Image (cartoon, rainbow, N blue to C red):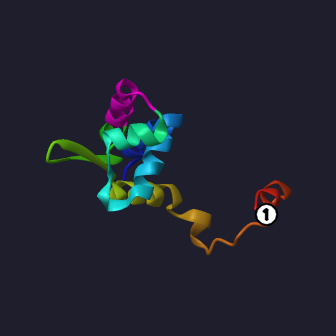
């Protein structure tokens, strides 16, 4: 993944509903979800949902497939993994990354 594709993907995810939508599709697995199921689970109106789906498709983060009369959306796991790889490339200067000591805030969450 190059820097332009990474910024496009990150920009698409930098919105509350799109981030929730993408996470929902990642959790749904390869079977994906219909637009109606997504709208029901996230409580997003269809007009807004169409816009958010188009933004994620434009960033290549989700895939749309027609199954009979329904459109099914799935996470593009290859693109997701490429983005994660881009973000972590040369992590820690090429050395093993040691876990950092949890802060008191992180300990409270766990």
Evaluate whether residue 71 shows in this view. yes
Residue placed farthest to the bottom in the image? 96
Q: Describe the element under mark 1 as helix, strand or loop.
A: loop
Residue, x 45% and y 31% (percent of image)? 44
Q: In this rendering, would 69 be left or right of 40?
A: left
Q: Nearer the viewer, residue 49 or 6?
A: 49
Position of the C terminus, as image quadrant, is: bottom right
Examine the rendered structure and indicate whether residue 85 appears above or below residue 2.
below
Q: In this rendering, would 79 be left or right of 43?
A: left
Residue, x 40% and y 51% (percent of image)? 25
Examine the rendered structure and indicate whether residue 38 appears above or below residue 77.
above
Quadrant in the picture for residue 106: bottom right
Examine the rendered structure and indicate whether residue 59 appears above or below residue 74.
above
Mark 1 surroundings: few (<14), some (14-19) or many (≥20) residues within 10 A: few
Instruction: Provide the residue span drawn in magenta.
Output: 44-55
Asked if the magenta segment contains residue 39, the reply would be: no
Residue placed farthest to the right in the image? 104
Q: Which of 61 and 41 is in front in this view?
A: 41
Secondary structure predominantly adopted by residues drawn in magenta: helix
Q: Nearer the viewer, residue 92 or 54?
A: 54
Examine the rendered structure and indicate whether residue 62 appears above or below residue 44.
below
Instruction: Give the residue at mark 1.
Output: 102
Q: In this rendering, would 87 be left or right of 95?
A: left
Residue, x 42% and y 55% (percent of image)? 26
Q: In this rendering, would 21 be left or right of 104?
A: left
The picture places residue 69, in percent across and down from the top left corner, at: 16, 42
Evaluate whether residue 8 shows in this view. no
The picture places residue 32, in percent across and down from the top left corner, at: 32, 53
Residue placed farthest to the top in the image? 47
The picture places residue 107, in percent across and down from the top left corner, at: 81, 61
């Amino acid at each position: 993944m190059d820097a332009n594709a990474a910024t496009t993907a990150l920009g698409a995810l930098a919105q509350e509903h799109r981030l929730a939508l993408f996470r929902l599709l990642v959790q749904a697995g390869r079977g994906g979800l219909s637009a109606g199921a997504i709208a029901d689970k996230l409580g997003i109106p269809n007009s807004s949902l169409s816009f958010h789906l188009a933004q994620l498709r434009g960033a290549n983060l989700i895939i749309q497939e027609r199954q009979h009369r329904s459109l099914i959306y799935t996470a593009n796991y290859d693109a997701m993994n490429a983005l994660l790889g881009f973000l972590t490339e040369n992590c820690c200067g090429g050395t093993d990354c040691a876990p950092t000591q949890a802060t008191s805030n992180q300990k409270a969450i766990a």
